Image (cartoon, helix red, strand yellow):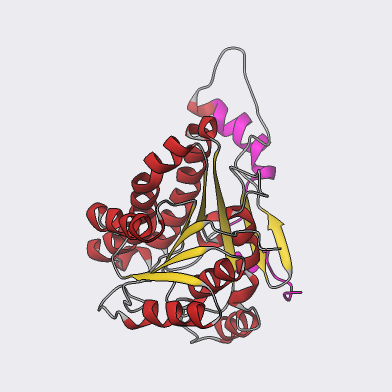
Amino acid sequence: MAMLKDRVVIVTGAGRGIGRDFALCMAAQGAKVVVNDPGVGADGLGHDDGPAAQVVEEIRKAGGTAVANTDSVAEWESANRIVKTAVDAFGTVHAVVNNAGILRDRIFHNMSIEEWHAVINVHLNGSFYMAKAVASIFKSEERGAFVHMTSTSGLIGNFGQANYAAAKLGIVGLSKSIALDMARYNVRSNCISPFAWSRLIGTIPSDTPEQQERLSRIKTMETSKIAPIAAYLCSDESKVSGQIFGVRANEIFLMGQSRPIRSVHRSEGWTPETIASHAIPTLKHHFYPLERSGDVFDWDPV
């Protein structure tokens, strides 16, 4: 069964890696795909029309339907051009996969302002711009689906990725807000946190045995394993909204969302002294340790 037959799906960052697999999977499921990718380097620099064109050619050779777009998601005007490409080619949009991303890893205290803005602009602002640009279509047609890419760097933590982690956790808040605000129009919004070897992951340093072990584990995880859940979430079969899924090889995780886990109270209120003597000793047993993604997902992928 072609779960996305005649649906129009925009996939950003679709020229390589996970995004390419998303585009191929959507097309295989019957979707008409806008393959968006400006062909930049992993750091967001440069431009190359080739990657998007190559994926379109792959889709067409397989009997699918696709068009290329090489605009950046990081600007409001160019995000609108991406949506216009879909409308001009196919008449409407049914789903958007916000996958485009770059990395500018740097330990926090050495991170430049430009490195901060570059990553925030592509990941967080880009996801907002794309969602906002298509929102009027979804609202008027009373349907639509968003899939946004988050990361355990934001959900759990990682070294040297303050810009990336902040953007990815911000995307979770954006997705939940879209899900709440647009539920009345039958619009769904969900996040995927992928585990896979990709071009961006390949930029992670491998200077220590610990880093090398982590990367060797990631290399066993294929990007194509992430695509099926994205296709499902974009389809009319899905009624799911406001959720965060993790995908690692053959494992699918439903990720937690922030909720109270313990409370304390004093009828007379709190002072700094009673917080020190009462609240913190009571709550500290439930504090989260300073863990990274690899500390939590410390078993081999299945």
Quarter containing the C terminus? bottom right
Quadrant of the rendered image containing residue 109: bottom left
Residue farthest to the top? Answer: 268
Q: In the visual, does 19 lie left or right of 242?
A: left
> Is 282 in front, or is 97?
97
Q: Residue at x 31, y 76 (%)?
A: 40
Residue pictured at 36% horizontal, 63% vertical: 108
Q: Which one is nearer the viewer's eye here, 297 or 54? A: 54
Observer-nearest residue: 296 or 198? 198
From this viewpoint, which residue is outermost toward the right? 302
Picture residue at 61% right of the left edge, 79% below the top: 218
Displayed quadrant of residue 75: bottom left
Can residue 138 be seen? Answer: yes
Tell me residue 172's x, y (percent).
50, 48
Total marks in image:
0
**Is residue 249 a member of the stretch shown in magenta?**
no
- Observer-nearest of 73 and 161: 73
Q: Which residues are magenta?
A: 274-302
Q: Residue at x 47, y 40 (%)?
A: 178
Q: Up-down: is 183 above or below 124? A: above
- Residue 174: image location, x then y, percent: 45, 44
Q: Is residue 230 above or below residue 57?
A: above
- Residue 23, horizontal then vertical, whole percent: 51, 70
Q: Is residue 15 left or right of residue 300?
A: left
Q: Is residue 187 above or below residue 207?
A: above
Observer able to see residue 149: no
Does the stretch in magenta take in 288?
Answer: yes
Q: Position of residue 61 (x, y in %)?
A: 51, 83
| Quarter placement of the N terminus | bottom right
